[in-house]
Amino acid sequence: MKRITVLLAEDHMIVREGLRRMLELETDIEVVGEAQSGRQAVELATKLRPDVVLMDIAMPQLNGLEATRQVLKALSATKVLILSAHSDDAYIESAADSGAMGFLLKQTSAHDVCRAIREVHKGKVIFSPTVARRVDRLNSQSLDRKGRINKKAAHLTSREVEVLQLIAEGKANKETASELGISIKTIEKHRQTLMEKLNIHDTASLTRYAISAGIIESSVQVTII
């Protein structure tokens, strides 16, 4: 029997180890890789081509929602299952836009996490009960023809979301340019485009937008420059 291959994307080592040990007990599931940042999750997914990515939302360098978009853009057969500590509408809406197949809360039992992995692998959509109730109230969401959670496309590009996250995390233009491997001039252009698109004119407001949109957690310590 072919096992379901899973990539774990979680920045907290103790949580990641717990998930791996839990999944190793299942005879039909195989953990093929572990990522501790969103960017690493995209790189490993592209390399390993797992059946399912179990994705945290709040991760450094690239948040799990944008990582989900990039993974699904590169790998049409891979399914992404969000596993988060937060069920705010902003996170659920962003997960909807990302193309994830499901959204579980971290208090979900081991049995239900394993069941969810099997279900999304079959192409089914699955939510924790609390998330399901919130989804019912979000009238803008629907399911696309592939069964994925879907809503009207976001108006920020993937690169703009990456830049916005790093700005909101307090990174200076030089740091952001170095992390993304592009020039400072290009970062400045992205920053200006973000402000124009969002009608926002200072870094503090960009940070507040990133929090409200679920791009970073409100608990993340940020420096306003």
Image (tube, rainbow, N blue to C red):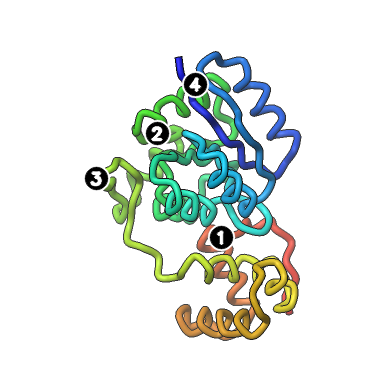
Mark 3 or 1, closer to the camera: 3
Q: Which mark is residue 37?
A: none
What residue sits right under mark 4 in the picture?
3
Q: Earlier in the sequence, mark 2 or mark 4?
A: 4
Q: Residue at x 47, y 78 (%)?
A: 198
Mark 2 or 4, closer to the camera: 4
- In the picture, measured across the screen, residue 61 lies left or right of residue 148, that is right
What residue sits right under mark 1 in the picture?
215
User: Which structural element holds mark 3?
Assistant: loop
Q: Which mark is residue 126?
A: 2
User: Which structural element holds mark 2?
Assistant: strand
Q: Residue at x 61, y 65 (%)?
A: 165
What amino acid does circle 1 point to?
Ile
User: Which structural element holds mark 4?
Assistant: loop
Q: Which mark is residue 145?
A: 3
Q: Position of residue 7 (x, y in %)?
A: 58, 36
What amino acid does circle 3 point to?
Arg
Q: Earlier in the sequence, mark 4 or mark 3?
A: 4
Furthest-left residue in this view: 145
Q: Residue 6 falls in which quadrant of the image?
A: top right
